[in-house]
Image (cartoon, rainbow, N blue to C red):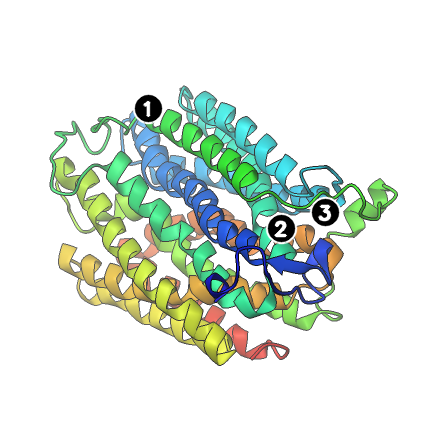
Amino acid sequence: MSHSLPADAPATVVADHSGAHVGEPVVASRLRLLQLTLPVANVALYLLWFGVGSFLLPLQVARITGTNDTAALSTASTIGAVLATVGNPVFGQLSDRTRSRLGRRAPWILLCAFLGALALVAQAHAASIAMLGLSWGVVQFIMNGYQAALTATMPDRVPTAKYGTFSALVGLGVPLGTIVAALVIGGVPGVKFGLDGVIGGFGGRFAGENGYYLIAAAVVAAAVIFVVVSPDRDARALPRKRFSFRSFLANFWVSPRSHPDFGWAFLSRLGVMLGYFIVLTYNMFLLAEHIKIPPQDLLPTVGFLMIVNALCTVVASVLAGPIADRIGRVKPFVLTSGIAAALALTLPMLWPTESGMLAYNIVGGLAFGVYMAVDMALITKVLPRSEDAGKDMGVINIANAGPQILAPSIAGWIVAVGGYEALFPIAALFSLIGALGVLRVRGVR
């Protein structure tokens, strides 16, 4: 571990795929700072994704329409996810080409954090579904720039031997962001907010506009902390590429024939994430309409289940990442976690009660924790070209945003045809297919 070295001793030399700093020693003290700031920056990001996506967005839809309108939620979610899909690879490639004193990624992390915060404030005042969808789309487009630049930090600055550990640290952003969102926006479990109607009232101090303001402030603060506390190297001396709009567009294509491992890793993540988002998209409405949670208990129940899921994810992620580093293998973890996630989805199908949802969140949280602990390590190992790390990480992140586009439409169709209970077996099937896809990744153990 790096903490056993003197403060400024070189920890190792970054492997060939590590981007701008190939062949340069990784200073142990900088690596330790990155271990602190990278999770913080990711927690703020996932506080935004889950705080808005799981709480503020459905609550705002209910306030605007006066009902649990799944079609309206699907519209707002889909508009946002489409723009998110475009934003990640675009900003990733822009950061690849950036040459600044702050490095390649920091300018985009800061710019997108500040612009994203302004867009969140605007979304807080959206008064129609069209405006809500458009503003959420702008937020997702901008914040995927933040995510693309932040994600590229790992191949840029982390030595290969630490991929499992850092993948786990990056993965902690999901459960910890979820916990903060559930506690601050959903409210402390067990506290009754006395919501009026289905879920149309705004209970809790941060369940309305204040929630947007809080998330905006958290994103800006996390970005500043990341850039100031763990600065990147000056990138002004790096080779510059002549800009061509045609080559800029062409560079987004990664041939699955030339890079089959990258293609299979993309499809594997797409399947697992699609299974995850099919249920998550309608989580609040599912609890209200299918599990029949009383309106006054809905937000605390959602918050409680999210916290349980997140805590299980944290435990599994913290344990799995270092183990993967020690044994030098990640594929068995991805495969096991995907199969476990599929099995977890069958629990509420067979046991459609609050207890069944609790069991699902425990098992599913453990499975997702293992997956998040090693997924980034797997992806980083199959990147085609070091100089395009930001763009390629942006392309692979389409496998995150894509399911958010597809899930609302797929889930809406499933609910219309088979009811809420049909969500679980279909989500399980997607998760299982995604898990099996990792077996085709040949270049990673």
Give the residue type at disc 3: Asp
Q: Is residue 79 something one can see in this rendering?
A: no
Judging depth in this view, the residue of 19 and 242 nearest the camera is 19
N-terminal-most mark, 3 or 1: 3
Q: How crowded is mark 3: few (under 14 residues within 10 Å), some or many (20 or more)?
A: many
Give the residue type at disc 1: Asn
Report the Cα–Cα distance between label 3 and label 1. Answer: 35 Å
Give the residue type at disc 2: Gly
* SS of the residue under disc 1: helix
Task: Give residue 142's position: percent from left, percent from top.
Answer: 57, 34
Q: Which of marks 3 and 1 is in front?
A: 3
| Residue shown at the point (39%, 57%) measured from the top left | 276
Q: How crowded is mark 2: few (under 14 residues within 10 Å), some or many (20 or more)?
A: many
Q: Name the residue under label 2.
A: 394
User: In the rendered image, which quarter is residue 27 located in?
Assistant: bottom right
Judging depth in this view, the residue of 148 and 249 nearest the camera is 148
Circles 3, 1 touching at the beta carbon (< 8 Å): no
Q: Which of marks 2 and 3 is in front?
A: 3
Task: Give residue 91's position: percent from left, percent from top.
Answer: 66, 41
Task: Give residue 436's position: percent from left, percent from top.
Answer: 49, 76
| Residue shown at the point (17%, 64%) measured from the top left | 351
| Residue shown at the point (49%, 73%) measured from the top left | 325
Q: Name the residue under label 1.
A: 210
Which label belongs to residue 96? 3
Report the Cα–Cα distance between label 2 and label 3. Answer: 11 Å
Report the Cα–Cα distance between label 1 and label 2. Answer: 31 Å
| Residue shown at the point (41%, 60%) measured from the top left | 275
* SS of the residue under disc 3: helix
